[in-house]
Image (tube, helix red, strand yellow):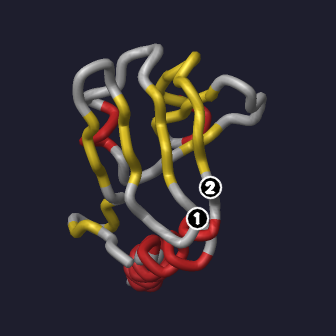
Amino acid sequence: MKEIKSIILFSILICMISCYNCASSYRKFLKKEMIYGKIIVFYIDNEQHLTPTFILSGDSRKLSLLGMEQMCKNVTLGDTLKKDSNSLDFYLIKKDTILVFNPKCNGSYVYE
């Protein structure tokens, strides 16, 4: 019986930890970033919990974007990715179209 209570308590603790408020994090950190460049590498990073990851021309760092699955379905190498500072709008610029995306957190889109 004591083991069952421990397992239940542990499960509740894990659930509480997993309720991370990503929307607050997006507004606090990601909103400040200015992102611009041609997408030269795109992959799903297995080591980072299946996070969509980009490398842009002129920038050697990896850009990992949680909550951007809808945008990732539309990415083609050579597209341009743009995000202005003080905004959460991501522009995926293709040859003939510009698509606008916002990050998603816990099933809802995150806006300004």
Residue 29 in sight from this viewpoint: yes
Disc 1 marks a residue whose amino acid type is Ser
Q: Name the residue under label 1.
A: 85
- Position of 47 with respect to 68 (left or right) is right
**Secondary element at tag 1:** loop
User: In the picture, residue 29 is in which quadrant?
Assistant: bottom right
Vertical placement of 25 versus 39: above or below?
Answer: below
The residue positioned 31% from the left and 42% from the top of the image is 69
Name, please, the residue furthest toward the front.
96
Disc 2 marks a residue whose amino acid type is Met
Vertical placement of 47 versus 78: above or below?
Answer: below
Residue in the foreground of this view, choosing between 15 and 36: 36
Residue 3 in sight from this viewpoint: no
Residue in the foreground of this view, choosing between 71 and 9: 71
Expressed as whole percent of the image width and height from the top left, the position of residue 98 reads: 27, 37
Precedes in sequence: disc 2 or disc 1: 2
- Position of 95 with respect to 26 (left or right) is left
**Secondary element at tag 2:** loop
User: In the picture, residue 59 is in which quadrant?
Assistant: top right
Q: Are marks 2 and 1 in contact (CB under 8 Å)?
A: yes
Q: Name the residue under label 2.
A: 34
Expressed as whole percent of the image width and height from the top left, the position of residue 91 reads: 38, 45
The residue positioned 23% from the left and 30% from the top of the image is 97
Q: What distance separates the C-alpha of mark 2 from that of mark 1?
A: 4 Å
